[in-house]
């Protein structure tokens, strides 16, 4: 039997972290792929990235995920970054390459794949309203724009929103919220959303969305994005295809769901 000491070590860092489903999801992926590895959740508050990254290096970790509020902070602690991470200015996935750390970003591609699996939109020319302009929103804007989507952006920080897209002026048929659950969205922004829009909230551990429940026809929380960005991270760490159905099953059990999200007015 391979001991924990011999198993590859991975983790997710951020704050808060107790709610994270990544340990269960990635542990299931490693088991399904026949890889001896352990995956932990480690609370690292804002300002603690440098010390945490140094500790993970010293402890021989093979890789780690990064969540709020460290995605930008971690980027300054690494040896190199992939193009996706450099363009987004944020890192959510890190692996050890030799003696160095390489940062990567799977948020944008993970969101695009999640929305495609849910609703199969034609991205070319699709009118998208992105709510929020933080690290995840930047990665999502890049991924959707690369697919030909027309991205407008609203944020509580207009100067940051302007870097991702113009203010919304036309009805959006896809709305992606990367805002905290307690954010307040102006009434005129909400009024500009197409009544038949698909609404995707990247949060998955919140009891509510900043968007009223009557906005949009089909809605999903962020579980599908968690799945797909996690599958991309797994593949990047290991060089193997992610066992995505094993990962999906864990998430569905954790959320108490009998069906996949994405149906009309799906519960959060």
Image (tube, rainbow, N blue to C red):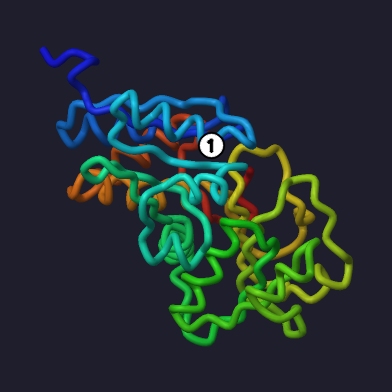
Q: Quadrant of the C terminus?
A: top right
Q: Who's the residue at 62% across and 54% down the image?
A: 201
On the image, which quarter does residue 141 sit in? bottom right
Q: Who's the residue at 26% across and 49% down the image?
A: 235
Q: Who's the residue at 70% across and 64% down the image?
A: 131
Rendered location of residue 239, percent (x, y): 18, 49
Q: Who's the residue at 51% across and 64% down the image?
A: 88
Element class at badge 1: helix
Rendered location of residue 247, percent (x, y): 34, 39
Task: Judge the density around disc 1: few (<14), some (14-19), many (≥20) Cα neighbours within 10 Å.
Answer: many
Along the viewing direction, whichever of 187 and 46 lies nearer the viewer: 46
In the displayed structure, would residue 173 be above or below residue 125? above
Along the viewing direction, whichever of 259 and 26 lies nearer the viewer: 26
In the displayed structure, would residue 51 be above or below residue 79? above
Q: Quadrant of the N terminus?
A: top left
Residue receiving disc 1: 49
Rendered location of residue 207, percent (x, y): 70, 37
Along the viewing direction, whichever of 161 and 265 lies nearer the viewer: 161
Residue 195 appearing in the image? yes
Considering every residue shown, the one lying at the far right of the view is 187
Left/right of residue 49 with respect to residue 130 in the rendered view: left
Considering every residue shown, the one lying at the far left of the view is 1
Left/right of residue 195 with respect to residue 32 in the rendered view: right
In the displayed structure, would residue 39 be above or below residue 49? above
Rendered location of residue 199, percent (x, y): 63, 62
Residue 260 appearing in the image? no
Number of disc labels: 1
């Amino acid at each position: 039997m391979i001991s924990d000491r011999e198993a590859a070590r991975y983790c997710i860092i951020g704050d808060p972290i107790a709610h994270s489903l990544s340990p269960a999801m990635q542990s299931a992926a490693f088991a399904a792929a026949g890889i001896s590895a352990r995956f932990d959740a480690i609370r690292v508050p804002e300002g603690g990235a440098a010390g945490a990254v140094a500790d993970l290096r010293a402890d021989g970790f093979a890789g780690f995920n990064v969540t709020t509020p460290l995605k930008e902070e971690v980027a300054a602690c690494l040896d190199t970054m992939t193009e996706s991470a450099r363009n987004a200015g944020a890192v959510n996935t890190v692996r050890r390459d030799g003696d160095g750390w390489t940062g990567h970003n799977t948020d944008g591609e993970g969101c695009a794949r999640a929305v495609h699996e849910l609703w199969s939109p034609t991205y070319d020319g699709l009118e998208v309203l992105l709510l929020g302009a933080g690290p995840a929103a930047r990665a999502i804007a890049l991924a959707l724009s690369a697919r030909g989507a027309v991205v407008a952006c609203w944020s509580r920080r207009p100067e940051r929103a302007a870097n991702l897209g113009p203010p919304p002026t036309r009805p959006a048929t896809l709305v992606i919220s990367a805002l905290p659950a307690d954010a307040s969205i102006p009434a005129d922004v909400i009024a500009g959303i197409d009544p038949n829009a698909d609404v995707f909230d990247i949060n998955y551990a919140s009891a509510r969305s900043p968007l009223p429940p009557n906005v949009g026809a089909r809605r999903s929380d962020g579980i599908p994005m968690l799945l797909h960005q996690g599958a991309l991270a797994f593949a990047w760490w290991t060089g193997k295809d992610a066992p995505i159905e094993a990962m999906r099953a864990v998430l569905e059990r954790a959320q108490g769901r009998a069906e996949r999200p994405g149906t009309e007015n799906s519960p959060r």
